Image (cartoon, grey):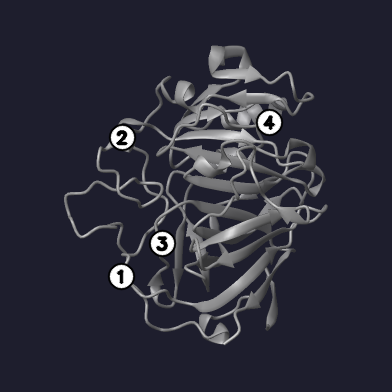
Amino acid sequence: MRRLFLGAAIAIAPVALGVSTAQASPTTTTTSSSSTYVAPLTGLPDPHGVTKKRAALTIKIDNTPEAHAQTGIDKADVVYEEIVEGGITRLAAIFNSQLPTVVGPVRSVRKTDREIVDPIGGIFAFSGGAAYAIRSIETAPVLLFQQSNAGSAMFRNPRRPAPHNLYANAAALSAKGGKPKPPPALFTYRSASAATPGVAVSSFTVGFGAGFETTYTWSSKTKSWNRSIFGAPDIDTDGVRISPKNVIVMSVNYQGGVGVEQSQATLTGSGQVYIFTGGHVQTGKWSRTNLFKPIAYTNSNGVMTLVPGQTFVELMATSQHVSITLKKK
């Protein structure tokens, strides 16, 4: 297999990776019926329109070895992985299509979270945080819930040690309101019949530091990316392998330093992006003019599209890199 080490700070043109110049037409329709409603955060059919009636619900999730196995991650529509103090990572899991009754372990807010939730609004659930981080999330257009005001929607699991034992009931939190309903789409999806652009990939590793490197391996059986972390498959408490349909790796600047207290990922401006979808990788640019707009993903062929389904977004520092193993021909 051919392995590529792609430095996040180095711009790589799509043609250098052999990306096809044939680009699928952007679309959010996943069936032949134009009357079928599509869930905004997955691009999947929502024939009963349940996502129309719900705001986005973002829950902050612990991602340390002590927090694994996690619960409910496989039910999230979108999951952001961000760098926090010491270079470790935390997850911000966004729910809209499915509302599991147990999600967690829930952990504290960081300044990056405001950058994530501003365009979708809704509800943000967390377990407290430093004063500067709470002041930051209070400026976002979200309802805030933690154990002190969530009632029975957040609870402790006595069988797990603190602080890795706080959980959330997504269904109960979602019932508390939030707006807009539905949330706006974050990505553009291509039709099921469209060709998959890019170069075929068998696996790739996102080079987070502090032992938090994350590897995704393409599964031709499930047509998704099997996630591994800490040298082992990422499997939740129900025995389900975490395996998103799409993985977006954004090269971002951490204002204040990578892994430094009070730093945050700057998600306005532009930077390099790798989009892994349909067993292929595309390279391009992410861009965003202000916090209230969703991030745009483009390359020389136009808008970069995803397959419908769950998406992980990796907020990788510009000093880090992606290691890609191309598929054997």
**Residue 79: horizontal and vertical position, in percent?**
55, 46
Q: Secondary structure at mark 2?
A: helix
Q: Secondary structure at mark 4?
A: loop
Whole-Å distance between the Cαs marked 1 and 4? 40 Å
Whole-Å distance between the Cαs marked 1 and 2? 26 Å
Whole-Å distance between the Cαs marked 3 and 4? 30 Å
The numbered dot on residue 107 is 4
Mark 3 or mark 4, whichever is nearer to me = 3
Q: Residues within 10 Å of mark 1 (few under 14, many from 20)?
A: few
- Considering only order in the chain, which callout, 4 or 1, is on the residue closer to the N terminus? 4
Q: Residues within 10 Å of mark 3 (few under 14, many from 20)?
A: many
Q: Amino acid at mark 4?
A: Arg
Determine the image quadrant of residue 115. top right
Tell whether label 4 touches label 1 (CB within 8 Å).
Answer: no
Q: Is residue 302 left or right of residue 247?
A: left
Q: Amino acid at mark 3?
A: Val
Residue that numbered label 2 is attached to: 50
Tell me if residue 294 comes above or below residue 73 in the rendering: below
Whole-Å distance between the Cαs marked 4 and 2? 28 Å
Residue that numbered label 1 is attached to: 193
Q: Secondary structure at mark 3?
A: loop
Q: Quadrant of the N terminus?
A: bottom right
The numbered dot on residue 289 is none
Q: Is residue 26 left or right of residue 214?
A: left
Tell me if residue 105 comes above or below residue 186 in the rendering: above
The numbered dot on residue 307 is 3
Determine the image quadrant of residue 152. top right
**Residue 29: horizontal and vertical position, in percent?**
27, 57
- Considering only order in the chain, which callout, 4 or 3, is on the residue closer to the N terminus? 4
Q: Residues within 10 Å of mark 2 (few under 14, many from 20)?
A: some
